[in-house]
Image (cartoon, rainbow, N blue to C red):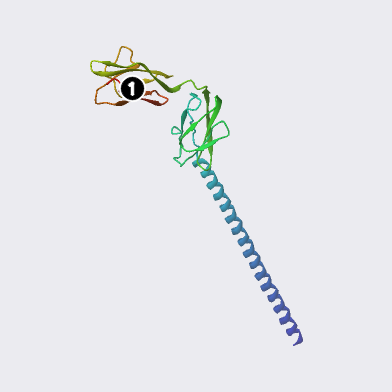
Amino acid sequence: MRRKNIGRTFITIIIIVLLAYAIIDSINKSILQYEKQESDLESKIEQQEEKTEEGLSIKNSPPIARAGEDKKIEAGSTIILSAYRSTDPDGDELIYTWGLGDERIAEGIMVQVQYPDPGEYIVTLTVSDSLEESKDSFKLVVTELISKAPTITLEIIEGPFLETGFCVYRVRANVSGDPSPKLYFNRDDGLPANDNIAQVNLTKEETEFTLIASAENEIGKTVKIITLKNTCH
């Protein structure tokens, strides 16, 4: 009887050991399978990220900056800087920044600037699509100011004198400027051969008259006035 009990106990222990081994083996297999699945998932994520980064790098192309050709202007004049010829292969919205060559910065696809001092300046355009940028430059030569706005001085060269019932004045306008200005008078009652001279005939009813001379060129316009009084009657 005692031997039977010992045999049963031994068999029970063996069964328990086998069951425990089977459970441990199953757990180990589950752990290994989970670790493999996790490793495969991480690998897939890394591959997807690499593909995404590669796709982004292929998709975005840098913009092409075009600042324009070399230019020459006079000191003090205005120059228009235009980046309209710049392009982006992807059609992205672009940011335009101009380095004016004298520590000044301007922003925009088109800007107006002045250079008061003569010299040579390297104007640099930077075009950015927020991811990449490109640059283009041109040389700007600023020369001494040559052109001049008109100047006028008025002088009475004849008069007043009485002629055929009129009190007559002849006034000369001395005009200078570069380019050569055009001269206009607000009254001329009988212009002599010299176009810079205006003749004013005052009637008895006119006690005085204000003669206005205007000279204008590409740089500007100047106006001078002189008052002529009727002292002949």
Please say whether residue 178 is visible from this viewpoint: no
Left or right for 66, reference 185: right
Q: Quadrant of the C terminus?
A: top left
Picture mark count = 1
Question: What residue sits right under mark 1 in the picture?
Answer: 184
The three-letter amino acid code for the residue at tag 1 is Tyr
Q: Residue at x 49, y 28 (%)?
A: 76
**Which quarter of the rendering shows the N terminus?**
bottom right
Q: Position of residue 20 (x, y in %)?
A: 68, 72
- Tell me which residue sits at (24%, 23%) in the image: 204
Q: Quadrant of residue 182?
A: top left
Residue drawn 75% across and 82% down? 6
Q: Residue reaching furthest right? A: 2
Q: Is residue 142 left or right of residue 10?
A: left
Question: Residue placed farthest to the bottom in the image?
Answer: 1
Drawn side of residue 203 relative to residue 60, left or right: left
